[in-house]
Image (tube, helix red, strand yellow):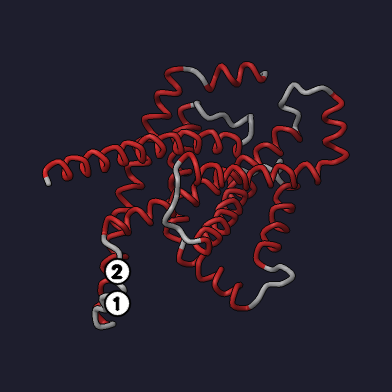
Amino acid sequence: MSFDEYIKHYTDPFGVLGIILVSTTVVCLMAFLLMLRARYVNAADIVLWEKAGKPEDILPPTRSEEFLLQLEMYCEMLFAATAMLFFVGLYFLIDYQYFPFPDEFYVTWEKYDDFLLLLALVFAILMIDLLDHFVVPLRNISSNAKGALRASAMLYMLIIFAYIKFIYDDDNYDAIIVYFIIMIIGRFIYFDVSIHDFTALIKGIYGAFPILAMVLGTTGIMALYGFFSGYLLWNNGVVVSLWIAHLFVILEICVLVNIWKLRAAGSKAVKQNED
């Protein structure tokens, strides 16, 4: 298929409608699971607060506050996973010459691909910041929690690579897998790392496992529908198709979050009028 044919395929109205309906269902399902997790975490926090003698200066978060925090954690890891998919997918598309670029571009790519990959990685990081600052602003997650969630997104990518390599039996990503593993090692073990920083990161990743499972579940459901319905294509790279599926999920999250904000603002205005 040519590049124009890909665009025509992915903008087919019936295909877009189907993927939007599935992504909406997935987002609602994940919101329900996050609500259950928030209820469990909130109950555990209250128990610890009561054991500490119910100090008035340190109140546990309310259930709605905990749900908002869990939702933001899910969004942060989803954004990071989407950026990683973009980074790897872009490498695949360029390396296999899917774009109708002139020959001089691909000559330059083969000569400086390592530096261009680093540039693409920087762009992916900027994409995460763009998503969690402007598209769906995340204001309740600490910097340490963000670091652990983004590190967990690297584990997410390793799981995706393992599926492609050993289950889908595709060797097209072998070069980028090695590059990615080196990058992960550098993320955990760097020159001035301390034992405290390393253990704190590991604890953060361990605590993010439920969120990681939800993001993997999101990808799995979207892939199951997308590939079997024919909307997501195998021949343009599995990672590229997963990235496209994630874009629809992010779109649904953006819409639902803004609806929730408008509803909250409306409820606040009604309450003020009644007072």
Q: Provide residue 273's location: percent of width, then percent of height.
A: 15, 41
Q: Nearer the viewer, residue 131 or 273?
A: 273
Relative vertical location of residue 20 with respect to residue 100 in this rendering, above or below: below
The reply to whether callout 2 and callout 1 are in contact (CB within 8 Å) is: yes
Separation of residues labelled 2 and 1 (CA atoms): 9 Å
Relative vertical location of residue 27 with respect to residue 36 in this rendering, above or below: above
Q: Provide residue 222's location: percent of width, then percent of height.
A: 45, 38
Q: Which residue is mark 1?
A: 48
Q: Provide residue 120's location: percent of width, then percent of height.
A: 70, 42
Please tell me which of labels 2 and 1 falls first in the chain.
1
Q: Secondary structure at mark 2?
A: loop
Describe residue 49's horizontal placement relative to residue 120 as left or right: left
Q: Nearer the viewer, residue 110 or 71?
A: 71
Q: Which residue is mark 2?
A: 60
Query: Which residue type carries mark 1?
Result: Leu
- Point 51% across, 19% down: residue: 11
Q: Residues within 10 Å of mark 2 (few under 14, many from 20)?
A: many
Q: Residues within 10 Å of mark 1 (few under 14, many from 20)?
A: few
